[in-house]
Image (spheres, rainbow, N blue to C red):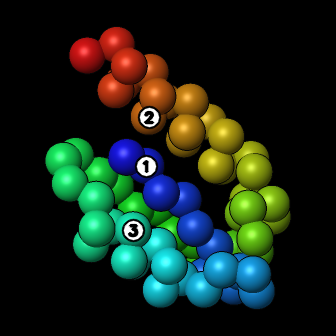
């Protein structure tokens, strides 16, 4: 499970990401961006390649 969350998200507070991480079992990773908005739209140049690399790693295992 990969959770990517912006800490300045006005729709869903970062606590929601922490709750998901506490709830989830198995391999999981939280990638947060301190200045990230909802959907980390202001960090897409980092989020998209990171997500693709994560998916490649975990889907090809």
Mark count: 3
Q: Residue at x 20, y 54 (%)?
A: 25
**Disc number placed over residue 2 in the picture, else none:** 1
Near-viewer residue (32 or 38): 38
Disc 2 designates what residue? 54
Q: Are marks 2 and 1 in contact (CB under 8 Å)?
A: yes
Compared with 49, 27 (above or below) is: below
Residue extending farthest to the top is: 60
Q: Residues within 10 Å of mark 3 (few under 14, many from 20)?
A: some
Residue 21 at what x, y percent from top left? Answer: 33, 67
Residue extending farthest to the right is: 42
Q: Residue at x 69, y 73 (%)?
A: 36
Distance from disc 3 to disc 2, alpha carbons, whole Å, reads 18 Å
Distance from disc 3 to disc 1, alpha carbons, whole Å, reads 10 Å
Numbered disc in front, either 3 or 1:
3
Apparent side of residue 34 relative to residue 58 in the rendered image (left or right): right
Q: Residue at x 22, y 46 (%)?
A: 27
User: Which numbered disc flags the more N-terminal residue, 2 or 1?
Assistant: 1
């Amino acid at each position: 499970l990969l959770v990517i969350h912006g800490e300045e998200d006005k729709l869903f507070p970062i606590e929601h990401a922490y709750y998901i991480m506490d709830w989830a079992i198995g391999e999981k990773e939280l990638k947060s961006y301190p200045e990230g908005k909802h959907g980390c739209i202001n960090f897409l140049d980092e989020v998209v390649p990171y997500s693709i690399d994560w998916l490649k790693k975990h889907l090809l295992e």
